[in-house]
Amino acid sequence: MAIRMIRLEGDPVLREVAKPVPEITKNVLKLLDDMAETMYDAEGVGLAAPQVGISKRIIVIDCGDGLIEMINPEILEKSGEQTGPEGCLSIPGLTAEVKRANYVKAKGLNRYGEEIIVEGEGLKARCLQHEIDHLNGVLFTDYLNPLDILKKRQPSER
Ligand code: NI
């Protein structure tokens, strides 16, 4: 396992639409291991492959109930609404309130190629939406008013 470099806002890979994973190879398994290690090292609750420079549809999350790895995740259902603080390892120093669905049900593959269903409310639902957004080149700041973002950024980052 290895900690990979987290790509920061402005890196074009974060804006690409990531490619589906056709086959779970040794490289994919290594990537999953490295992504989990990188996420825990950075004290994040989720990480998407584009954040380590790999434009593939893979996410890892851990919102306090253990590590979940998803390959080719897709949201099947969402409902309700929540507004809460959100941040991103690719946008250090910025947190802002983001409106999201309160419940999400998603499907994807685990590392063995088996279909898994992951559902959750609150933080877990937020996490799933945030990480799957990354696979579509979407950052949480896209939901914010640009002027609010400017005000919230630390002066050194302006
Ligand atoms: Ni993020």
Image (cartoon, rainbow, N blue to C red):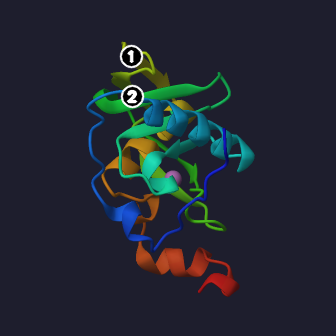
Q: Residue at x 30, y 35 (%)?
A: 21
Q: Residue at x 68, y 86 (%)?
A: 155
* The C terminus lies in quadrant: bottom right
Mark 1, other Cα within 10 Å: few <14 / some 14–19 / many ≥20? some
Which residue was labeled with disc 2? 104
Residue 117 is labelled as 1
Task: Determine which quarter of the picture holds residue 129.
Answer: top left
SS at circle 1: strand
Mark 2, other Cα within 10 Å: few <14 / some 14–19 / many ≥20? many
N-term mark: 2 or 1: 2
Q: Residue at x 53, y 81 (%)?
A: 150
Q: Residue at x 45, y 44 (%)?
A: 131
Q: Pick whichever, 80 or 114, lies toward us.
A: 114
Percent position (x, y) of residue 106? 35, 25
Q: Pick whichever, 59 or 99, lies toward us.
A: 59
In the rendered structure, the answer to whether residue 155 lies left or right of residue 147 reads: right
- Residue 135 at least partly seen: yes
- Toward the front, the furthest residue is 26
Q: Label 1 is placed on what type of residue?
A: Ile
